[in-house]
Image: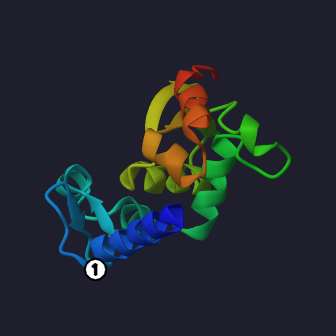
Amino acid sequence: MIYDLSRAERQHRAIATESAPPILIRKLCACGKASTAKQLAQHGKCAACALAAVRDAIMPGDFAKLQHMLGAVQQYPKSKWGWRNYFAASSGQQHEAMQRLVAAGLATTGRTCGDMTYFYATRLGCKAAGLDGAGIKRAMEDDDGC
Ligand SMILES: [Zn+2]
């Protein structure tokens, strides 16, 4: 009985916290979701909104290329995603797609190899492609290509 009471008390407190004004380190994004002050200072929005804004800045086909870049595709289990991190593009549509990813902060331009330019996903790109922490670490360590 005592246990039940304390649990009810905890639940009550959780609800009260939710509707209370945000405490110092937690602030609200424009979407209404709580975010950290650091995240808001750096990006001006919560992580979800930042990713949504990035997705809006690129074309749907670009996102598939980003996923391909990281091996984050259905042929591979999610635990393997990030096993590669490069995309070789010559001029034309692929190159334009890569430059949109770079402009959106999802990829960075690497070395050139003949008429091919290598592009690599950034940490944000890895996150956008759905990689988890281990996958991002894997992708950031990959230094292949060319
Ligand atoms: Zn938000």
Secondary element type, mark 1: helix
Q: Nearer the viewer, residue 27 or 48?
A: 27
Label 1 CB-ligand 1 distance < 8 A: no
Q: Which of 14 and 41 is in front in this view?
A: 14
Q: Tell me the residue that label 1 is attached to.
A: 19
**As drawn, 72 above or below 7:** above
Against 141, residue 35 (above or below) is below
Give the image quarter of residue 56: bottom left
What x and y, as percent, mark residue 94?
60, 52
Q: Residue at x 52, y 35 (%)?
A: 120
Quadrant including the C terminus: top right
Q: Position of residue 125 (x, y in %)?
A: 49, 47
Mark 1: few, some, or many residues within 10 Å (few <14, many ≥20)? few
Q: Residue 113, how many percent across, how many down?
A: 57, 24
Q: Nearer the viewer, residue 129 or 41?
A: 41
Give me the residue at 26% from left, 77% from top. Answer: 30
The three-letter amino acid code for the residue at tag 1 is Ser
Is 73 displayed left or right of 90 in the figure? right
Q: Is residue 55 visible in this depiction of the protein?
A: no
Residue at (51, 61) in percent of width and height: 3
Residue at 51%, 48% (x, y): give it: 127
Q: Is residue 120 left or right of residue 108?
A: right
Q: Residue furthest right?
A: 75
The answer to whether residue 51 is left or right of residue 84 is left
Query: From the viewer's perspective, is residue 110 above or below residue 20?
Result: above
Q: Can residue 11 be seen in this view?
A: yes
Q: How many numbered marks appear?
A: 1
User: Above or below — where is 34 with respect to 131?
Assistant: below
The x, y position of residue 40, in whole percent, is: 22, 58
